[in-house]
Amino acid sequence: MQEGCPKNMVNGPCGGVDSNGKCEVDGRPCPYTELLKGKPEVLETPILGPGFIYKDVSLEIKGYSELLGKMLNGQKVFLIELEPSRRGHGLRFLDQARPFKGVVDGFSITDNPLGRVQTDPVAAAGYLRVNGFTEDIMVHLSCKDRNRASLTSTALGGLWLGVKNYLALTGDWPGFMAGPHVKPVFDLDSVRLIYMLRLLRDYELDYMGGKVKEVPEFNIAGATNPYSLWEIELRKLRAKRRAGMEFIVSQPLFSDEAVRKLKDIKNDPLLRNLPVIATVMLMRNRWDVDIVRKHFHVNLHENPDPLEELENRINNILSIDYVNGILIVFSGDWNYAEGIASIVKRCK
């Protein structure tokens, strides 16, 4: 099965499988979906493979970060996703972040989404810190561009800068935005990355057992895609939980049906205690709508007032008791930042 997966997944499948079981890379049937016919329970057990030491992972959830602590105490949180710009000086990055200073509970910083080359997310987190931002930061760590050694270095660098949350991702296939000659890495997948981060935090060890002294406390999130095969997604979430995941962040939700699927997480005996953050996306124009149709296979209509549509969607999701927070994605278009900040103030 690993040989039949373009991403070389060990804990398959990834979030890039559509609802028909097709791979996002080239449309082939995902080999891991065959397990649903015979041994679906295999999908729920983390597989580490060679090169890892084995330690027990506690299922106790501790709110080391302020963000997770708020959710564990029953508070609904708001995060803004920031895409670090390609500009070396970073002023535009600050422009899109500044309206949310003191308004949101945290910032979520992407890691070259869709293969588009941007500033390193840990560097962007540090830039926020040196410019007076004190909100919690959740850095995305993707396996598509880095091997396990590089991921360890990146995580440790973020801890130096006060990063208290990591979102562990397998990552998108680089695709056309990275260029046809870019080679994806995928040394790890999200399950093994979660476990590796727990080794750092709980045992002060790297993946081979080497000592890493005085690692600060932080929390680890995993992602879920309601537009994939949902039975597989739930089983994959159980594997992530057993590997050490402490809260869940959904991919963008565009329909009531996708939001309702999150309730299955709260009904699952292994997952029910995990806080869930629902992601919503500002649909600015026809280009955004077309991207969503292609990537998520959701039929949407362009709204002449995207901010009004966003606020309505947020309020609908906040009324649901099994959602613990909202992550707002707006594709780095700082022209909408002030309007989105006003929405957050009203919704809080």
Image (cartoon, rainbow, N blue to C red):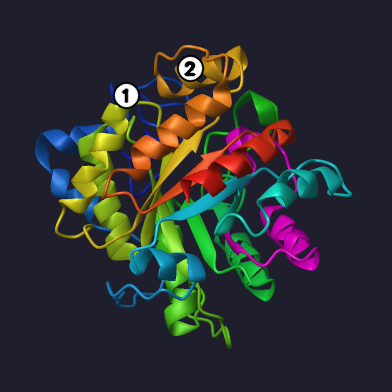
Q: Is residue 125 magenta?
A: yes
Determine the residue positioned at 42% across, 24% down. Answer: 296
Residue under the image location 52 percent in, 64 percent down: 165
Vertically, is 302 above or below 78?
above
Depth-wise, is mark 2 or mark 1 nearer the camera?
2
Query: Along the line of sight, which residue is nearer the eye, 41 or 118?
Result: 118
Q: Is residue 176 above or below residue 344?
A: above
Locate residue 313, reporting x and y percent: 42, 32
Q: Say above or below: 304 vs 321.
A: above
Magenta-colored stretch includes residue 149? no
Q: Is mark 2 on a helix, strand or loop?
A: helix
Amino acid type of disc 2?
Answer: Lys
Q: Quadrant of residue 60?
A: bottom left
Marks 2 and 1, the one that precedes in the sequence: 1
- Dividing the image into 4 quarters, which one contains the N terminus? top left
Q: Is residue 238 left or right of residue 338?
A: left
Range of magenta residues: 111-138
Residue 294 tag number: 2
**Looking at the rendering, which quadrant does residue 244 occupy?**
bottom left
Residue drawn where x is 70% and y is 32% of the image:
333
Question: Quadrant location of residue 151?
Answer: bottom right
Cα separation, mark 2 vs mark 1, equals: 18 Å
Given residues 184 and 288, the one toward you in this image is: 288
Furthest residue in direction left, as rendered: 38
Q: Position of residue 301 (x, y in %)?
A: 47, 11
Horizontal and vertical percent position of residue 235 = 22, 47
Label at residue 68: none
Q: Mark 1 points at which residue?
A: 29
Residue kind at label 1, given as amino acid type:
Pro
